[in-house]
Amino acid sequence: MDWILRTVKKKALQVLQEVNLEHRADAWPRTLSGGEAQRVGIARALVREPAFLMLDEPFAALDALTKIQMRKLVIDLWRKHHCAVLLISHDIDDALLMADQVVVLNKGSISYSLDIPWDRAKRRQHPEFEQYRLQLLSALGVQEN
């Protein structure tokens, strides 16, 4: 039984280190910031070494700097763990910066799909970023001035 507990604790500490939270291993959940709580959620999923990781609004309610750090963390973890990632987001920029394919759902059905051909080192300054952004906005029925 001690061996099992040591193994579980070792794995938990390993994934906390991967999400840069090993220093908060003994923290109470209520004392975590929003970004820390999001990273704990990702760590919780990684403990099981999944082949598929679904992230539902992982950057919601995060400040701009934490959001940038979280995007990088998710990409780094994807590269390390080689799992498929489904990112659910209402943020078009997040979708364009993180995804290989963006799918728009309307009433539970796919209403639009867009393949993103850039590599994972995406930047808003990419020459096609604004073109894809406008396509997605149009698919969502939004016209920007």
Image (cartoon, rainbow, N blue to C red):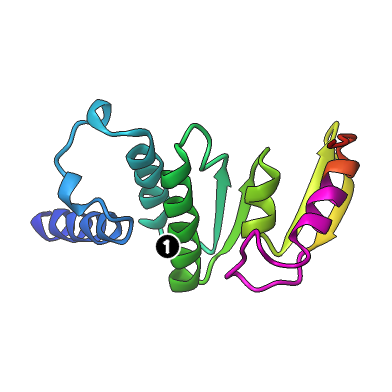
The residue range painted magenta reads: 116-136
Q: Secondary structure at mark 1?
A: loop
Camera-side residue: 70 or 88?
70
On screen, residue 64 above or below 8: above
Say whether residue 16 is left or right of residue 81: left
Q: Residue furthest top?
A: 30
Residue shown at 58% from the left, 41% from the top: 56
Residue 99 place in picture, x, y as percent: 67, 60
Closer to us: 28 or 36: 36
Residue at 18 percent across and 54 percent down: it is 9
Residue 47 sits in quarter: bottom left
Tally the numbered discs.
1
Q: Main secondary structure of the magenta part?
A: loop
Q: Position of residue 45 (x, y in %)?
A: 42, 51
Quarter of the picture containing the N terminus is bottom left
The kind of residue tagged 1 is: Glu
Please report the residue visible at 62 percent of the width from the left and 58 percent of the height from the top. Answer: 98
Q: Position of residue 120 (x, y in %)?
A: 60, 69
Count neighbours of disc 1 (C-alpha within 10 A) and say few if under 14, some if 14 to 19, many if 20 or more.
Answer: some
Measuring from the top left, give residue 55's x and y in whole percent: 55, 47
Residue under numbered circle 1: 49
> In the picture, which quadrant includes the C terminus?
top right
Q: Residue furthest left?
A: 2
Q: In the rendered image of this protein, does residue 131 appear above or below residue 64?
A: below
Q: Is residue 110 visible?
A: no
